[in-house]
Image (cartoon, coloured by chain):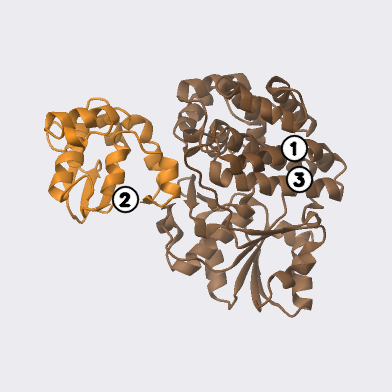
Amino acid sequence: MGVFKDAAELYECIGGLFRRGAEHPEMGPKIRASKLIIKFQYTNPEAQLTIDAKNPPPEGMYFNVIEGENDLQADVTMSMEADVAHKFWFGKLNLVMALNRGMMRAKGPIAAILKLLPSIKPAYELYPQYLREIGKEDKIMG
Amino acid sequence: MLPSFVDFTMRTRLVAGPGLVRELATELAGYERVLVISDAQLVKLGLVREVTEPLEAAGVDVVGVFSDVPPNSEVEVVMAGAGFARARQYDALVAVGGGSVIDTAKAINMVVATGQHLLDLQGLGVLDEPLGTLVAIPTTAGTGSEVTSHAVIKDAGTSAKLTFTSPHLAPDLAVIDPVMTRDLPPKLAASTGMDALTHAVEAYLSTNANPFTDALALEATRLIAQNFRRAVRERDEESRYGMLVASSLAGAAFNVALVGCVHAMAHACGGLYDVPHGVANAILLPWGLEFNREVAAERVDELGRAFGVEDGRQFIEAVSSLAAEGGLPTRLSEVGVPREGLEAVAEAAAVDGAVFTNPREAGAEDLLKLLERAF
Ligand SMILES: [Fe+2]
């Protein structure tokens, strides 16, 4: 079995990280500025997260984080196994290799996504910290 | 030390030899109708005929020549080319041209096979199925596009350069023949040659390099050292052949290893100030090497030895004089980049895809320093 037992657990972990990102004083404004709608399509377990930096965000957040299917028109859609995503958020995934090997697919103007890479670096530290906080230490990658 | 994981692909069958375009029909046994993608200048110079006449003599129908490809191809051109192609029955596309023509043919192939608009095909790994047969016959020794799985097309509306990447984009066959570069003007021979050298150098220094790409990159570097000057000045067949082979070798290397900060800055100079790709690379390569030598001294030395000099320091000097001898500008100030524009170039380069495989981390501030020195 993979890292997450079901979609609910993925939403709690990665979705939770995204919500933290949406409140983050450094990452939040930079993602907001991109005005992108980015959909993440996960398999094993089947799940979907959307970052919506186009429409007005809720109070206290820089962008919307949406769990599950929705009708928003995504600028970029990223598809991957949930385990690949988990590894990515620890900063432990060689992105070039993952893309070359088809472990990750990106549909849309990828230059727009690459532009965001430098600004999401704080997430790599935030993720293990957050997992510890919610009692999911077992998922922290060494 | 060998990397713990190695991934190498070259999907394109490649044949090379002086006069080989005359034998294309042999390579295309079983194909009856081909459609040619090229540009008006190459038609005028008779280079398209070098390919089509022998094909027709061998009983292969040339069902059309789409010759509207501009130097920096655009989305509209691709869609028009796809319309042209759809209206004709063919079983193989033959691209005769430089990087822009070959990339356009890749994009047309993709639009025709998927039935989608080009703008909906951006991304990485978006194609599930192989496309139609594509043959690439380069008429410059530079881009390496005849063996890569990338295509770059400009969106005239936003003037953004769109990138398309998929293993299925790689041509099925590349035909390397120095006859096809016989009319290459010296300046273009020099700038495209410097592009090829930059591919070899950056692939060799890339964080994604592996023993296979290393071998290709070093041999490309060696061949460029031997042939560049003659291919620009005397333009004899042997040196032009050497440059074409070097360009494909470097293409196969960077197709896997990718490039680095020199390309990131060159893309930004091209996007913001229309500096020709090869010219920008030629100006920036010595500064990029200087910057990366801090973390990759041994590898830069190795490139120097392949180039026929003693070490990395001499290599950097040799690269600068090569560009100057080729008659190329050596400063950004000479090619229309204003000093007050350098910051914007640095910002754009810092988030260009190419910068992520540079051996030394390069943020906007580092790049700005390099750009100022190259100004
Ligand atoms: Fe290039």
Q: Residue placed at 60% from the left, 44% from the top? A: B212
Q: Ligand 1 shows up in which quadrant of the image?
A: top right
Q: Is mark 1 within 8 Å of ligand 1?
A: no
Q: Residue placed at 77% from the left, 61% from the top? A: B47
Q: Position of residue B318 (x, y in %)?
A: 75, 26
Kindly indicate whether the residues beneath marks 2 and 3 are on one polypeptide chain: no
Residue for badge 2: A80
For residue B255, side relative to residue B180 (left or right)? left
Q: Position of residue B265 (x, y in %)?
A: 55, 32
Q: Position of residue B5 (x, y in %)?
A: 47, 42
Residue under mark 2: which chain is it in? Answer: A
For residue A20, side relative to residue B276 (left or right)? left
Depth order, front residue of B184/A128: A128
Please state, as top left, top right, bottom left or bottom right, where the N terminus of chain B lies in the image: top right
Mark 2 against mark 3, which lies toward the viewer? 2
Q: Residue placed at 54% from the left, 52% from the top? A: B151
Numbered circle sitting on residue B222: 1
Numbered circle sitting on residue B327: none
Q: Is residue B81 visible?
A: yes
Label 2 neighbour load within 10 Å: few <14, some 14-19, many 20+ = some
Q: Which chain is orange?
A: A
Label 1 neighbour load within 10 Å: few <14, some 14-19, many 20+ = many
Q: Residue placed at 72% from the left, 50% from the top? A: B140
Kindly indicate whether the residues beneath marks 1 and 2 are on one polypeptide chain: no
Residue under mark 3: which chain is it in? Answer: B
For residue B330, side relative to residue A62 (left or right)? right
Answer with the quarter of the image where residue B205 lies.
top right
Whole-angstrom CA distance, mark 2 to mark 3, is 41 Å
Answer with the quarter of the image where residue A35 lies.
top left
B112 w.r.t. B220: above or below: below
Label 3 neighbour load within 10 Å: few <14, some 14-19, many 20+ = many
Q: Secondary structure at mark 2?
A: strand
